[in-house]
Amino acid sequence: MILRARQFEFRFPRPTMVMGIVNVTPDSFSDGGQFPNAEAAVAHALRLEAEGAGILDIGGESTRPGAVPVSEEEELRRVMPVLERLAGLSQVPISIDTMKPGVARAALQAGAAIVNDVGANREDDEMWRVVAEAGAGYVCLHMRGTPQTMQANPVYSDVVKEVAEFFFDRIQRLLVCGVAIEQIILDPGIGFGKGLEHNLELLSGLESFARLERPMLIGVSRKSFIGKLSGCEPRGRLPGGLACACLAVERGAVMVRAHEVAESLQAVRVTEAILAKKRAE
């Protein structure tokens, strides 16, 4: 299995990649406003890379439940200074976390290599054509509704089956728009339009997505369902997030999106060593 994201190419199986989160937003659920200027955000991104991040994910619009959308102009104002400076300093792929084709296009022109699209449930194909034209990697994330509506009583008859069907449908649409299969990454969207039980069902059934033969990204870091299970605030949810990440790797995930890169990398490397020993027996 191959992933191509502009000038980058990754062949799987390979060690799990950790995608480091760099939010340049004032209202993200756990770290909004932490990096108030481009210098602070770039320094944080480079720290994550030094800790072992294989991808840096830059986001300028919060996608927490109920988040208020920002204009394209405001999102560009937040992310572009960071991307432009980071592109000349980082040695790993930079991902732009956006739902806006205009922001994706500008970020790719500035040096980003991946578009992380929580709005992959879109019907308009402009974003996909931007990705195709740039030869960028594309994270296809499953979300029910929008960040404003996604947690309003989400209902599924079989969440694992429905997410798999969504992936199959979106892969076909992406191919029609000129996105190569090697550019596609799948993310089941833990916490995006799912209740507690839906998240647990998805995590327990991740191996169901392996038949699609695309790299699978899991984002569980500091998510609210961990808080519901543990009673912890976002900053105290690292142990629960690591448990989910290790389980996800055991069930086929090859990328983990995380706020705490060093801790996540250590956890998945130990998991991989155990799994390798088990396979060798």
Image (tube, grey):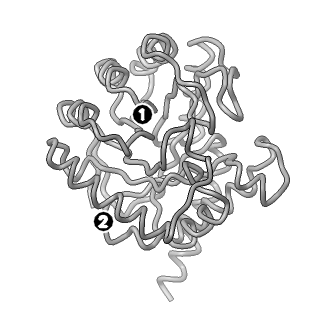
- Identify the disc placed on residue 212: none
Residue 276 located left or right of residue 30: left
Frontmost residue, 52 versus 110: 110
Circle 1 sits in a helix, a strand or a loop, which is it?
A: strand
Above or below: residue 6 compared with residue 183: above
Q: Does any portion of residue 239 appear in the rendered image?
A: yes
Three-letter code for the amino acid on which mark 2 is drawn: Glu
Residue 31 located left or right of residue 80: right
Three-letter code for the amino acid on which mark 1 is drawn: Ser
Quadrant location of residue 130?
A: top left
The residue tagged 2 is 213
Which residue does the image show at 74% across and 50% down from the upper left? Answer: 238
Which residue does the image show at 41% across and 14% down from the upper left? Answer: 84
Which residue does the image show at 71% across and 35% down from the upper left? Answer: 30
Query: Residue 274's spot in the image, x, y percent?
Result: 59, 74
Query: Residue 106's spot in the image, x, y percent?
Result: 33, 18
Above or below: residue 83 compared with residue 216: above
Residue 227 located left or right of residue 113: right
Upstream in the sequence, badge 2 or badge 1?
Answer: 1
> Callout 2: few (<14), some (14-19), or many (20+) C-alpha neighbours within 10 Å?
some
The residue tagged 1 is 95
Q: Quadrant location of the N terminus?
A: bottom left
